Image (tube, grey):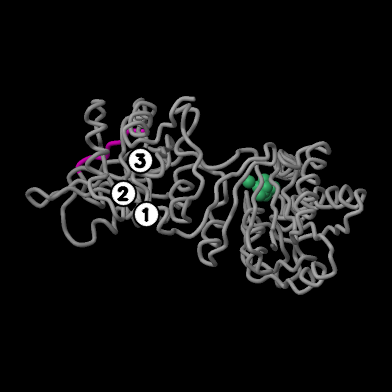
């Protein structure tokens, strides 16, 4: 099989870890697989480099910052190639530009436009093991660019697609995706197989195991991702296309996000254009609005409630205070102690009563639901933050996700 193996920061965080990574590459080669490696910088290194640039000049030119931070990945690529060569493996390191990653868009958040992979493919055919620096590429003008934090996941998936790999293995410091946060539910269970869509829903709720863009890309090209640990030789979670075997009895997992705040605009005249009046300025300030509820209007007036990231709460309230008069709203209220809890699963497509069950479970726990939103494979509620643990635990249990104690 042709496999792209990507190793994250903790997997290459020291020379010792790089040797362990070399062990993994070596044993895959012994099994007869064709391997291309993509690496992150050593853990903490990207932050260290960014901080150095800032210390030199808080307004450092983005072009130079990119040139600087891209070195982090080049260091690990070269070190891993050195170690593989010491073992007699024909490894060869490549920067993103050398590997053919062409990008467009701004520095620090460039996007991959094309991978000129002929060179790498030729190396592979010669039996070489390319070790590619993730997170970077080169733009039309020849400048080094980086892909945004966590971008080496996207490098790996894009490369896997370009060289028509069978799979992209992403090695990290967790051994897979769990049915919920094990810090809240100690007997959460590892998910063997998860669909791209479910993975995206988990990610959007703050489970930052994979860069979201990498999952979107994998979904578009149906590239299976095996998310697994480089610390323990166990099967991880396969992120793949939904299939019949995923028609699970229950939901797949329970996710949450504490980083939420709620804003309510009271008593706005209900006529066409009010939502645009409210959300125009908010969008303009680049504040990400999530759950939105507009009440049925009474006597020509209505209320709108929505959530924003907690870090944008103060700015949102301030903004609405300044536009309140223009909106002719009676009042603006807010609460920055709310949180979101979601149940996620493709099983919802074929099973009815899932949302109802969620509401019953929360009612039994006397947890008040403030807002509700649904998609085809997700039901989200907004509740008081102090009830997050209780909500997650009870939902996980009542939907039968608790692993039997062993
Ligand atoms: N080293 C980069 C970062 O920390 C890219 C990556 O690790 O994916 O964001
Ligand atoms: Mg990462």
Q: Is residue 335 magenta?
A: yes
Q: Is residue 112 magenta?
A: no
Few, some or many residues within 10 Å of mark 3 (<14, 14–19, 20+): some
Q: Which mark is residue 281?
A: 1
Instruction: Identify which residue is drawn at 34% across, 51% down.
Output: 347
What distance separates the C-alpha of mark 1 from that of mark 3?
A: 12 Å
- Cβ of mark 2 under 8 Å from ligand 1: the answer is no
2 vs 3, front mark? 3
Q: Is residue 348 above or below residue 47?
A: below
Find residue 305 and report its horizontal and vertical position in percent.
26, 44
Helix, strand or loop status at disc 3: helix
Mark 1 touches mark 2? (CB < 8 Å)? yes
Depth order, front residue of 376/115:
376
Where is mark 2, residue-wise? Answer: 323
Instruction: Identify which residue is drawn at 70% across, 63% down.
Output: 2
Q: Is residue 236 left or right of 336 when viewed as pictured?
A: right
What distance separates the C-alpha of mark 2 from that of mark 3?
A: 10 Å
Q: Is residue 193 left or right of 33 when viewed as pictured?
A: left
Find residue 50 and report its horizontal and vertical position in percent.
71, 44
1 vs 2, front mark? 1
Few, some or many residues within 10 Å of mark 1 (<14, 14–19, 20+): some
Few, some or many residues within 10 Å of mark 2 (<14, 14–19, 20+): some
How many numbered marks does the figure carry?
A: 3
For the stretch drawn in magenta, what is the main secondary structure? strand
Where is mark 3, residue-wise? Answer: 317
Q: Is residue 17 above or below residue 75?
A: above
Find residue 243 and report its horizontal and vertical position in percent.
43, 59
């Amino acid at each position: 099989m042709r496999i792209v193996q990507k190793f994250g920061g903790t997997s290459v965080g020291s020379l010792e870890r790089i040797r362990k990574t070399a062990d993994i590459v070596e044993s895959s080669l012994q099994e007869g697989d064709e391997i291309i490696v993509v690496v992150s910088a050593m853990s903490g290194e990207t932050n260290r480099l960014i901080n150095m640039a800032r210390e030199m000049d808080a307004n450092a030119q983005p072009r130079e910052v990119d040139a600087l931070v891209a070195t982090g990945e080049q260091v690990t690529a070269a070190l891993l190639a050195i170690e593989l060569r010491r073992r007699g493996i024909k490894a060869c390191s490549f920067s993103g530009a050398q590997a053919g990653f062409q990008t467009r868009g701004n520095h620090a958040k460039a996007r991959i436009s094309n991978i000129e992979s002929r060179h790498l493919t030729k190396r592979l055919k010669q039996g070489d093991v390319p070790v590619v620096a993730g997170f970077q590429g080169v733009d039309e003008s020849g400048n080094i660019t980086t892909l945004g934090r966590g971008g080496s996941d996207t490098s790996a998936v894009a490369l896997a697609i370009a060289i028509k790999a069978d799979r992209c293995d992403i090695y990290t410091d967790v051994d897979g995706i769990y049915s919920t946060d094990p810090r809240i539910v100690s007997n959460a269970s590892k998910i063997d197989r998860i669909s791209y869509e479910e993975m995206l829903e988990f990610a959007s709720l703050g489970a930052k195991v994979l860069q979201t863009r990498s999952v979107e890309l994998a979904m578009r090209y149906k590239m299976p991702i095996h998310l697994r640990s480089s610390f323990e030789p166990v099967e991880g979670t396969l992120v793949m296309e939904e299939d019949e075997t995923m028609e699970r009895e229950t939901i797949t997992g329970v996710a949450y996000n504490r980083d939420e705040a709620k804003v309510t605009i009271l008593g706005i005249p209900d006529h066409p254009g009010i939502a645009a009046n409210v959300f125009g300025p908010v969008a303009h300030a680049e504040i990400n609005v999530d759950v939105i509820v507009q009440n049925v209007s009474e006597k020509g007036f209505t209320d709108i409630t929505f959530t924003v990231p907690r870090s944008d709460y103060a700015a949102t309230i301030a903004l609405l205070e300044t536009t309140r008069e223009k909106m002719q709203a009676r009042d603006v209220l807010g609460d920055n102690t709310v949180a979101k809890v979601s149940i996620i699963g493709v099983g919802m497509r074929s099973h009815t009563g899932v949302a109802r069950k969620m509401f019953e479970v929360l009612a039994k726990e006397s947890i008040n639901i403030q807002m509700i939103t649904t998609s085809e494979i997700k039901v989200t509620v907004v509740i008081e933050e102090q009830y997050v643990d209780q909500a997650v635990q009870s939902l996980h249990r009542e939907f039968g996700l608790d692993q039997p104690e062993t």
